[in-house]
Image (cartoon, grey):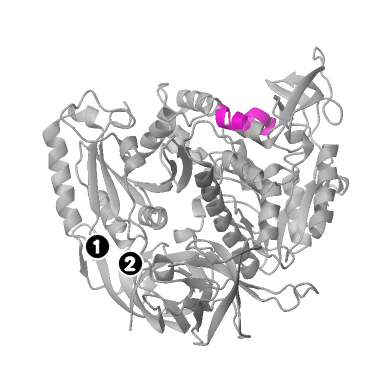
Amino acid sequence: MTMIDSGTQATPAEIKQSVAELEDEAITIIREVAAECRNPVLLFSGGKDSAVLLHLAVKAFRPGSLPFPVMHVDTGHNFDEVIEYRDMLVEHYGVKLVIASVQASIDAGRAVEETGPRASRNRLQSVTLLDAIAEHKFDAAFGGGRRDEDKARAKERILSFRDHFGQWEPRAQRPEPWNMLNAKIRPGEHLRAFPLSNWTELDIWRYIGIENVALPSIYFSHRRTVVERNGMLLSVGGPVVLEAGEKAFEETVRYRTVGDASCTGAVRSTASNVNEVLVEVAAARITERGATRADDNFSDSAMEDRKREGYF
Amino acid sequence: MVLRIATAGSVDDGKSTLIGRLLHDTKTVFEDQLSAVEKASTRYGDGSLNLALLTDGLRAEREQGITIDVAYRYFATPKRTFVVADTPGHAQYTRNMVTGASASDVAIVLVDARNGLTEQTRRHLFVASLLGVKLVILAVNKMDLVDFDEATYHRIVAEATAHADALPAPVVLNALPISALLGDNVVDASTNMPWFKGLPLLDLLETIEVPGDHNVGARLSVQWVIRPYSTEHHDYRGFAGRLTGGSLAIGDLIRVLPGGQQSTVIGIDRGGVPQDTAQSGEAISVQLADDIDIGRGDVLVAVVASEAPIVTDRIIADISWMVDKPLETGSRWIIKHQTRTAKAFVSAIELRHDVATATHSPAESLTLNDLGRVHLNVSVPLVIDNYDRHRPGGAAILIDEATGMTCAALMIRDNE
């Protein structure tokens, strides 16, 4: 396909080469963690980063099959399109799927539902994730996190050490000279692996275009009933309930990220395919998390705080 | 196409401000990031826009006005894409600089024009030399605080050049006078320093040429053996890993080290897609004509390789010691070299590098931030290269068996 990229003089061949180099790096990381860890798992949210991650993981072991399972931390606040997409992919790749349910954590009293009209289950995912890692004795969890997403993530290692409490301690990280990965852990500790560390949002979309990575339909423009809240467009129905004075309306939108439906916002967009999204991403003036995640806008260090608690 | 940059400087030399300035002036900073920085500038500063807060992301960093850990930033201009490793200058300064420099093409070393060359500057130049970073940009910052004085600038550059010439491996110095705070010679040429005829920093970064790697011949350290056991691929055995040092083609003769068996390449896959040849850096899997016992950690080497690697269980390496617990003669560690993990015994500490004078002295032990040279006995033979000839074959880390912490970076120079 023809890649359209504004703001760069790079030729299509150069773009293909730079994305291929990122693929080489990611596949090397995935193979290394699979070899060094006893029982890794790949975290799959249904979002574009985890779609790219799964695509890379499958490629890393071809023509063999994926040597580890895929886990979805299910908040219960899902977009229907994303669940359909998840089940389609699992079938297509023939991978083993583990579902960790936030609802089950709440029912078991391990997590307490936030209350009020703006309650979200985003934060509760950390409890469910850590419980599932302990229950299945996973020693490493692959995530789709990227360093360009957030200022706390910019300090994250490729292989990130978590203590017995699942916590991230930014002041005591393991150095990674030459990107050499140290996967040594003691029982009870685990690792998070981020093969997409050095990718940017633009790289992800370029890769999706070049490799024809399938995505949930909500990443492309569609008509949706939304409400505007704190400058974000939230989908009405499901977990989002109208507050007094708010009015729902129809809009042509798409999603730049996919997360908990209660706090993931849509953006006004007519981009209906990867090329049109690429033009939009290259011209965007707001980061994807800033535009679409209510949870990261709470405070200056919202992501750092959640990461310390064991978030993805 | 991508230029990898490490930035180094002492505390308060203005590294974070410089990177913030590059991100800001290349319009890489998004509106929401800028508004967050404006808000934070009010809380942590005098209210004027503090560009350092673009990179100092952790709460403690903002509160203390320091950078704690290596942060990675990505920006692009129409001409080039950049990855910046911002390496902080305090506490674990050498560890951070080594980590940042290990994967970089260029090091930007900042000097405060008021202070001139400090021990930290000399240390940064030494680390760049030791880690094989051949290109160094000496950015003499805060020129606004010395009235943009030409003589001050030339005195600092002369001092740095003299030190660079004395380093164990030569580095090429590109010097320029800047003010990261005001933007002089960062993106746009300074109107305050018409006496400086060189390129502003961004132009320099866009055009600087990185010397290519030595072609030592193809090597592949096996990460994983792909065995599908399916009906379709019943006899498939693919040795997966990252190719380094040179290219490989179907039909090439390879030797398996340390075992020594030979075979012929009959298949190359990259991401599961068959191809006839592979280039250095590609993550591939290789099929061989013969049924040889090959596992993780073994190395496939092209028989025609221009420089054969050395198989040895005794190595001599420069070392950067990164933890509080000291390194002593007789101590035992886990060594990770390529995809091989083994045990290592410190048979001797040959010397400690004195970074300020670029000389060395004898040492009984090495402590946090020390650079030295050690002799190691390894429990199994390693397939090594001299670090200067082939970085992947000459790089290794030491791990503390008790804590799992990465304690050292090793640059292998020789075998015993």
Instruction: Pick out the residue farthest to the right.
Output: A107
Residue B311 vs B273, above or below: the answer is below
Q: Was residue A174 drawn as part of the magenta stretch in this picture? A: no
Q: Was residue A292 drawn as part of the magenta stretch in this picture? A: yes
- Residue B215, by quadrant, is bottom left
- Residue A240, by quadrant, is top right
Nearer-the-camera pick, B33 or B188: B188
Q: Kindly state the secondary structure of the residue where label 2 is placed.
A: loop
Tell me where residue A123 appears, x and y as whole percent. Answer: 72, 40
Q: Is residue A115 left or right of residue B202?
A: right
Q: Is residue A24 left or right of residue B237?
A: left
Residue A298 in view here:
no
Q: Residue at x 73, y 38 (%)?
A: A258
Nearer-the-camera pick, B34 or B75: B75
In the rendered image, which residue does mark 1 sit on? B169
Residue at mark 1: chain: B
Tell me where residue B400 appears, x and y as whole percent. Answer: 49, 70
* Magenta stretch, overall SS: helix
Q: Is residue B4 left or right of residue B180?
A: right
Residue B356: image tag: none
Q: Do tag 1 and tag 2 residues touch (Cβ < 8 Å)?
A: yes
Q: Which residues are magenta?
A: A279-298
- Going by the numbered disc 2, the residue's amino acid type is Asp
Residue A90 vs B193, above or below: the answer is below
